[in-house]
Amino acid sequence: MRKGVNNLEFLNCSYNKLNTLPILSNKLCVLHCSNNNLDTLPILPNSLEEIYIKYNPIYEIINNMKPTKRSIKNMRYIIKKLHNFKHLYYSLKLKTKFRKILWEKIREPKIRLKYHPTNLNKLLANINDKTFQSTLDSW
């Protein structure tokens, strides 16, 4: 964060069509961010005493989770859980993509080079009958 933002205690960013918020100051006490397009919130600082997030998609998400008490502590807990799920989702998504890339770019070309029938013909052309069986055994 920029110098001075670390000391921010009150933030009113309502009615701005915001999609995300930056990491919040550890000294922030009041956050007003109603009427935006927020579908996620950063982790809420422990110093936060008031938060207004109505008319944002994140408000609907949190409300649908039906916390027993409408407190900042419960909201902080829900937001942390949402961050964990989001992290897990992207980790699994990237893991699948990584496996595909690993197969296509590294493993498959090596297997194709070693075991493709055209390669077998090249290898057999250089091998006499005595070493043929040992070559097949090494495969």
Image: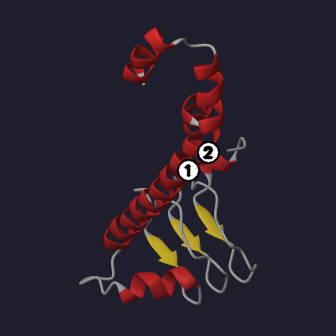
**In the visual, does 21 lie left or right of 64?**
right
Residue lying farthest to the left in this orientation:
68
**In the visual, does 127 lie left or right of 77?**
right
Image coordinates of residue 71 in percent, x first then y, are: 33, 76
Inter-mark Cα distance, 2 to 1: 6 Å
**Residue at 40% from the left image edge and 87% from the top image edge:** 63
Q: Label 2, on which residue?
A: 104
**Label 1 Cα neighbours within 10 Å, binned few <14 / some 14-19 / many ≥20:** few
Image coordinates of residue 129 in percent, x first then y, are: 48, 14
Image coordinates of residue 79 in percent, x first then y, are: 42, 67
Image coordinates of residue 86 in percent, x first then y, are: 47, 63
Q: Amino acid at mark 2?
A: Glu
91 or 47, which lies in front? Answer: 91
71 or 125, which lies in front? Answer: 125
**Residue at 39% from the left image edge and 59% from the top image edge:** 84
Q: Quadrant of the C terminus?
A: top left
**Residue at 53% from the left image edge and 52% from the top image edge:** 94
Q: Which color mode does the image show?
A: secondary structure
**In the visual, does 19 lie left or right of 60?**
right
Q: Is residue 84 above or below residue 78?
A: above
Q: Assign a secondary structure to mark 1.
A: helix
**Residue at 46% from the left image edge and 62% from the top image edge:** 89
Report the mark closest to the observer, 2 or 1: 2
100 or 107, which lies in front? Answer: 107
Q: Quadrant of the N terminus?
A: top right
**Label 2 Cα neighbours within 10 Å, binned few <14 / some 14-19 / many ≥20:** few
Q: Is residue 111 above or below residue 47?
A: above
Residue lying farthest to the right in this orientation:
16
Q: Label 1, on which residue?
A: 100
Query: Are the two marked residues, 2 and 1, in contact with CB atoms closer than 8 angstroms?
Result: yes
Q: Assign a secondary structure to mark 2.
A: helix
Q: Amino acid at mark 1?
A: Lys
